Each structure stands twice: as C-alpha cells, then as structure tokens.
Amino acid sequence: MRAHQIIVIGALALVAGPLAGCDGNARPAQASIHQEHMGVVAQLLRTDRAEHRVGIRSAAERLAPGFVATDDPEQRERQMRYALRYVQEPPRGVPEFIVSPMSFLAVVGRDGVIIARDGRAEDDHMKGQNYAERYETVRRALEEGRPGYELAEFPSSEEGGESSYSMLFVHPSRRNGEVVGAAIAGIPLWREAQRLTRQLAIDHADQNGLIFWVYIYKGDQLFHYGTPEGVDAEMNDGAAASAQRAAGLATSPGGYTSDVLIQGRWFAYGVLPIPSLGEDMGAVIWRADPM
C-alpha cells in the first residue's frame, strides 16, 4: 500500500487551482472528469451504500433462525458458517451481495462477540472478537435494535502499520420480536476504489487506450489497488497530499481538476470531496486519454 500511495501524493503537489484551472495538456480529460466522472463516482458510492443497507437487512432476516437453532456453540458456528456462504450464492442468495466488493459477512452474538464470518474456519480471525465494544453501530444494533452504518477502523496487524478502514453495515436479527444477534458486512475502502476504477473502465470499454484509476482518500491516507509501479517511481518526491487537497478545496470546495506529465504522457485528475463517507474524505479520479 505504501508504494502505491506515492503517485497521488506527487500529483497533488502540482495543484494549481479550481476545476479546469490548470495549464497542462490534458484539458479535455479534465473536462470529462469534471462534467462526467465526478458525478458517476459520487452516484456509484451512494448506490453501493444504499444497496448494502438493503442487503444486510435481508441477510439479518435470513440468518436469524441460526442464532436460536441450537444451544451448542460449536454446532451454531458450523451452521452459521454454512448459512453465511449460502446467502451470498446464486440463485437464492441476497441479490445485493452476489456481486459485491465487500470482504466479509459475519454474525455477532447477543453478547457482541463474533460467532463466525464467511469463509473457511481456519481463516476466520474475526471469531471471538467483541465488536460491540469496538463499534458503536454494532452495540446499538444489539442493545437498541437499530440498523446502522459507520466507517470502521481496523488496526494493522503489523507493528507500526497504518490502520485500514471499511464501510461497515450492521442490522439486528430478530426472532419473535426480540433481538437475538446481528449481521455485519464490511467493504474495505481499497476494494471500493477498485470497484469504482473497474466500473469507469467498463463504461468506456469501447475507447481503446483510455485509462482510469480511482482512489479514495481519508486525511493523508489513500486507498486503492493496482497502481503501476512505473508511475509510482515518477512521483517519488511528492509533497503531502492532504495539505495540497486542502489548498485546492479552499479555492474550489466542490472539487477541482488538474493534470501532470508522467513518462511523456499527460494524465488528468480530479479531487472530489465526499463528506457523506466521513470527515476529510473523498475520491481522486485519474484519467489518461489514448495517445
């Protein structure tokens, strides 16, 4: 992740002003980012969150019987692990989850502790963790019966490593009107950025040679996937991205575009603040037109 953060940090150091306000040779690409791609990315983020709110509600309803089917914890875990896989598979799976960038679907017991997540038991590092203590939305789902969404921080498993962040969707499961547990799903920001990149590429698949990258930022952290190493190397001496974004957004609070010359090719990018994701959060959209 660290190596892939360099490209945007360097490019943002070249910010010159508000939307379509720079002097490079990628003005048509800047205009496309401003007039089209920013709106598409914002809408995709809204749609993804709305669909996963619907999906987690459906999953919580389908998984509810498993919380009370047995008093044997080991049997409950086995049954839940099967059910977690089943609700994501066609043809009868939750439609919103069959094709999704989420990295986990899990069930939380009434005590706030993870019973199981999807996937193999030997790979389940979430089992046994108390998510009600860690995340407010999980606590509220269990204690107040309220569905919720939050940007959840996951500490790095490496000493001194940066935390990762996921969009966390939570919904209580009920039997006979009583809360018996909760279902939770998480979409890592880097996976959401990857999904946005792919969608832009699909939307413009008929334009050979057109390149897109989408990054999600939170403060001075950037979340993305697949940045070419050669481009990273071009931008090794970049300044602090968050300070440059702040300067650009002070001039153009709704977002701005700029461009940068990388290895003889002009790249345009746009910075789009998305406060509904969280404080000091948004997307950086890159586009390079065919040469």
Image (cartoon, grey):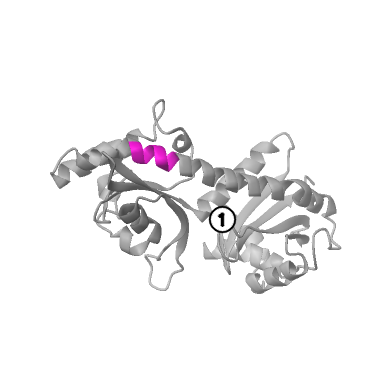
Is residue 157 highlighted in magenta? no
Residue 237 placement (x, y as % from top left): 66, 73
Residue 60 placement (x, y as % from top left): 35, 41
**Residue ID at (31%, 64%):** 133
User: Does any portion of residue 164 appear in the rendered image?
Assistant: yes
Residue pointed to by mark 1 = 224
User: Does any portion of residue 169 appear in the rendered image?
Assistant: no
Residue 234 falls in image quadrant:
bottom right
Residue extending furthest left? 72
Give whichever of 176, 162 is nearer the camera. Answer: 176
Is residue 60 highlighted in magenta? yes
Residue 274 placement (x, y as % from top left): 63, 57
Horizontal side, residue 144 vs residue 266: left or right: left
Specify start and end residues of the magenta stretch as a single range.
55-61
**Residue ID at (78%, 48%):** 35
Horizontal side, residue 154 vs residue 43: left or right: left
- SS for dot 1: loop
**Residue ID at (16%, 47%):** 73
Give whichever of 159, 234 is nearer the camera. Answer: 159
Residue 141 placement (x, y as % from top left): 35, 52
Residue 20 falls in image quadrant:
bottom right
**Residue ID at (84%, 62%):** 21
